[in-house]
């Protein structure tokens, strides 16, 4: 259900009057599903169509960047999640194996929309990596195969901004789909906002991208018109959109308004509800690394109803006071102001991974894979970097943690 231009303008005015402008559009209401009796499996979560693929996917999906266990996967299944997002690199390259063994043991494979990722440097290498992912996951097919972190410097893809509309990458995508080993293809992206916006926009033009999973949050969609327009373009072109990194901040001590308490939401699930209110997103990839988070997020998905403009403005007001741990909107202003070539925000993202779930060995390897100049902030004016950062990250503290734990 899209808004006409007048009603969209009115919607923005209402949000601004309540304390924050909002640029998301309401989603079609999802039917709530009753909770199952204690100890019994619940029905699958409500679904949304993933762009022009026409495939219905769970509106909430299980991110597996942290180590997973058979127990957690069993509980996830009983809670009704039917979408798993993983990658070759997750949990020191062990999570795909665990998930594959779980599928083999339980027979649940055909119930799930399975997404994995790899980091090819060329189209041919992407095709080659597919068989490796199939073998590790112990499956005959992957539902959605992503290029992992398209645009990250360490990926080394030539002319990366043109990849989403490249004939060579399109040919590789077509070859994989025709093989029957993969249903859909696309990329994830959390590079700097200018490049990320270009990649998303080009995905709408290129024709071969079935889905994109960009790092995004409500503040970014509210404040960055170019990024928001790129999402619109993809949505209109039928490219499926999956949100990730929607809650990157320290919510401790955040005062939740009564309206959300009455809905049974906490600070994190209120953000999920606000993102679900944007009909462009088919699903949210959530970092549910423990059972409490899993059950809270599932409960929010089951009870979801689109938030009103006033409620959306309340979420924005809450977010504006949150201490950010990673800047989803980074445009490089921080490092320019600091007078350094160090990739300050990527380092901040790695430190945020430590704060969320440990993963010291994996995160340390990611940090050390950065080019030497990208992890050398000697002489940088970190106070100036923090002042210039759109999210006002505390780079002095963040980089001290990186020095102590990752270097």
Image (cartoon, rainbow, N blue to C red):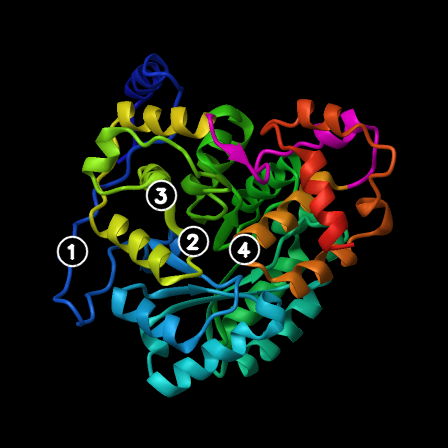
Q: Describe the element under mark 3 as helix, strand or loop.
A: helix
Q: Describe the element under mark 1 as helix, strand or loop.
A: loop
Q: Is residue 347 above or below residue 129?
A: above
Q: What's the residue at 33%, 44% (across, down)?
A: 269
The segment highlighted magenta reads: 321-342
Rendering quarter of residue 295:
bottom left
Q: What's the residue at 48%, 48% (across, down)?
A: 244
Q: Rounded to the nearest whole Å, what is the CA distance between mark 4 and mark 3?
A: 29 Å
Q: Earlier in the sequence, mark 1 or mark 2?
A: 1
What residue would you read off at disc 4?
208
Residue 140 visible somewhere in the drawing: no
Q: Quadrant of the C terminus?
A: bottom right
Q: Position of residue 225 (x, y in %)?
A: 51, 25
Instruction: Give yes or no for contact between labels 3 and 2 (Cβ–Cβ under 8 Å).
Output: yes
Q: Rounded to the nearest whole Å, what is the CA distance between mark 2 and mark 4?
A: 26 Å
Q: Which mark is residue 286?
A: 2
């Amino acid at each position: 259900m899209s808004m006409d231009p007048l009603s969209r303008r009115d919607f923005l005015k209402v949000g601004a009057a309540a304390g924050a402008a909002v640029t998301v559009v309401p989603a079609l209401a999802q039917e709530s599903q009753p909770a199952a009796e204690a100890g019994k499996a619940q029905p699958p979560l409500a679904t949304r169509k993933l762009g022009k693929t026409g495939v219905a996917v769970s509106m909430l999906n299980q991110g597996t960047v942290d180590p997973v266990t058979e127990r957690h996967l069993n509980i996830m299944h009983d809670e009704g999640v039917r979408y798993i997002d993983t990658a070759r690199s997750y949990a020191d390259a062990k999570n795909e194996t665990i998930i594959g063994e779980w599928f083999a043991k339980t027979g649940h494979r055909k119930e799930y929309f399975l997404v994995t990722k790899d980091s090819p440097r060329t189209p041919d290498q992407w095709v080659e990596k597919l068989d490796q992912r199939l073998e590790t996951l112990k499956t005959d097919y992957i539902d959605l195969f992503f290029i992992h972190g398209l645009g990250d410097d360490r990926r080394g893809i030539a002319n990366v901004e043109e990849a989403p509309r490249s004939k060579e990458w399109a040919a590789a995508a077509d070859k994989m789909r025709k093989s029957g080993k993969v249903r859909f293809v696309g990329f994830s992206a959390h590079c700097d906002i200018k490049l990320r916006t270009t990649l998303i926009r080009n995905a709408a033009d290129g024709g071969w991208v079935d889905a994109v999973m960009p790092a995004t949050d409500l503040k970014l969609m509210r404040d960055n018109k170019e990024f928001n327009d790129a999402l619109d373009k993809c949505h209109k072109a039928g490219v499926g959109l999956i949100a990730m990194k929607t809650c990157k901040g320290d919510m401790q001590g955040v005062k939740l308004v009564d309206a959300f308490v009455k809905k049974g939401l906490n600070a994190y699930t209120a953000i999920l509800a606000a993102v679900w209110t944007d009909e462009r997103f088919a699903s949210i990839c959530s970092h549910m690394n423990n059972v409490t988070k899993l059950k809270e997020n599932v409960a929010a998905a089951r009870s979801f109803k689109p938030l009103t403009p006033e409620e959306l403005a309340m979420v924005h007001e809450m977010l504006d006071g949150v201490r950010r741990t990673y800047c989803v909107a980074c445009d490089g202003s921080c490092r320019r102001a600091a007078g350094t070539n160090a990739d300050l925000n990527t380092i901040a993202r790695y430190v945020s991974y430590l704060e969320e779930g440990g993963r010291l060995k994996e995160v340390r390897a990611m940090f050390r894979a950065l080019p030497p100049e990208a992890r050398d902030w000697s002489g940088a004016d970190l106070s100036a970097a923090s002042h210039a950062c759109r999210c006002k990250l505390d780079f002095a503290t963040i980089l001290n943690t990186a020095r102590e734990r990752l270097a």
